[in-house]
Amino acid sequence: MKLKTLGEFIIDRQQDFPGSSGDLSRIISAIRLASKIVSQQVNKAGLAKHILGGAGTENIQGEAQQKLDVYADERFIEALNNRGNVCGIGSEENDDYIELNKEGKYIILMDPLDGSSNIDVNVSIGTIFSVYRRVSEVGKPVELRDFLQAGVKQVAAGYVLYGSSTMMVYTTGNGVNGFTYDPGIGVFFLSHPDMKFPDQGKVYSMNEGNFNKTSEGVREYIRYCQEVDKETGRPYTGRYIGSLVADFHRNLIKGGIYMYPATDSSPNGKLRLLYECNPLAFLTEQAGGRASDGEKRIMEIEPTHLHQRVPYFVGNTEMVQKVEEFIKNEK
Ligand code: AHG
Ligand code: MN
Ligand code: MN
């Protein structure tokens, strides 16, 4: 088998864009480096007291921070800062955005550690990232408006999954490619070229503990997923890990829908538009799927604040359209 490393792939792709500055390649390389460091810590988390458990602090959203949330946040910021071409980073774990090199042309939005509740129980977790070109003037400090861009403006997005193996999956708007990490030699290899959602999805993923707290339209769709119907292959299979990256990755490979709808206690859902929903929406559309807030395309939403939340429905196009239909026709 002909093996291609992530490093080779990045160089190949750069050659597809003659005259490009290589900035984007440097950013992907920084993410690759940080993800190797985090991956190594994740793999020994059960033995490492400095990694397991709560950090004793809360993020701006009032969520308890885990030590690994903070650790991953620091490693990604450090690696990206070292490349010099990033002018600012917005992270789920920081109250405000961080200013980096004024001369940098790019900004990063990230969820450094997704699935925090799964760290201490040895279940898959991830990192989600998104890259935009700044809109403010190069050479001046980065501004809030650089971070509040609609998802359609993303130039790259992806995730790292720390699972039974560590994988990096990303897009620069030219398809989705997945790389599996070989920890023995410290190299990512292209293992999943040109990823696409399969034609038919059979998996639905939602925290069904929220069933009675969500809208009738969503409840109707869940009942539809559970209905017995030979022709459409229902009931679908219910799978929910509670780490968005892991649930998303499975659904991308096997075909399915992930939902985090509005609930009585979280009227905008739980997931964050800039750190979680937009990057996975970009990957989704590149893989032939759809990402919606139940009515409209996620990537067209004009963000109003950094930590904004949004109801989220993502996966196979027909499945997302179906739930949108139930929401629209809600009695
Ligand atoms: P994070 O760990 O970055 O705060 O994200 C957790 C998110 C997402 O990964 C997951 O799908 C969802 O929260 C789980 O929420 P529930 O526990 O409410 O199901
Ligand atoms: Mn998350
Ligand atoms: Mn997180």
Image: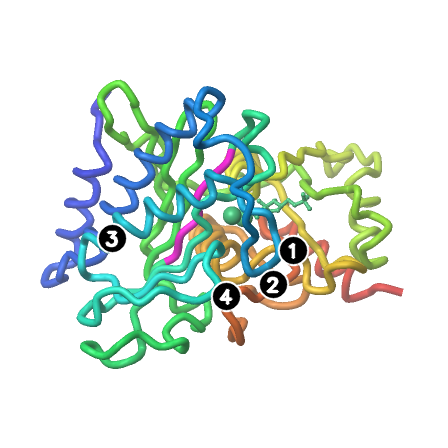
Sequence-wise, which precedes: disc 2 or disc 1?
1
> Which quadrant is home to the C terminus?
bottom right
| Magenta region, residue range | 125-130
Q: Amino acid at mark 4?
A: Met
Residue at the spot of label 4: 299
Residue at the spot of label 2: 309
Q: Amino acid at mark 3?
A: Ile
**CA neighbours of label 3 inside 10 A, class few (<14), some (14 to 19), many (20+):** many
Numbered mark located on residue 27 in the image: 3
Q: Nearer the viewer, residue 90 or 200?
A: 90
Numbered mark located on residue 86 in the image: none
Residue, far front:
56
Q: Nearer the viewer, residue 85 or 292?
A: 85
Sequence-wise, which precedes: disc 3 or disc 1?
3
Label 1 to label 4, Cα distance in Å?
17 Å
Q: Residue at x 81, y 36 (%)?
A: 229
Q: Nearer the viewer, residue 16 or 134?
A: 134
Label 4 to label 3, Cα distance in Å?
22 Å
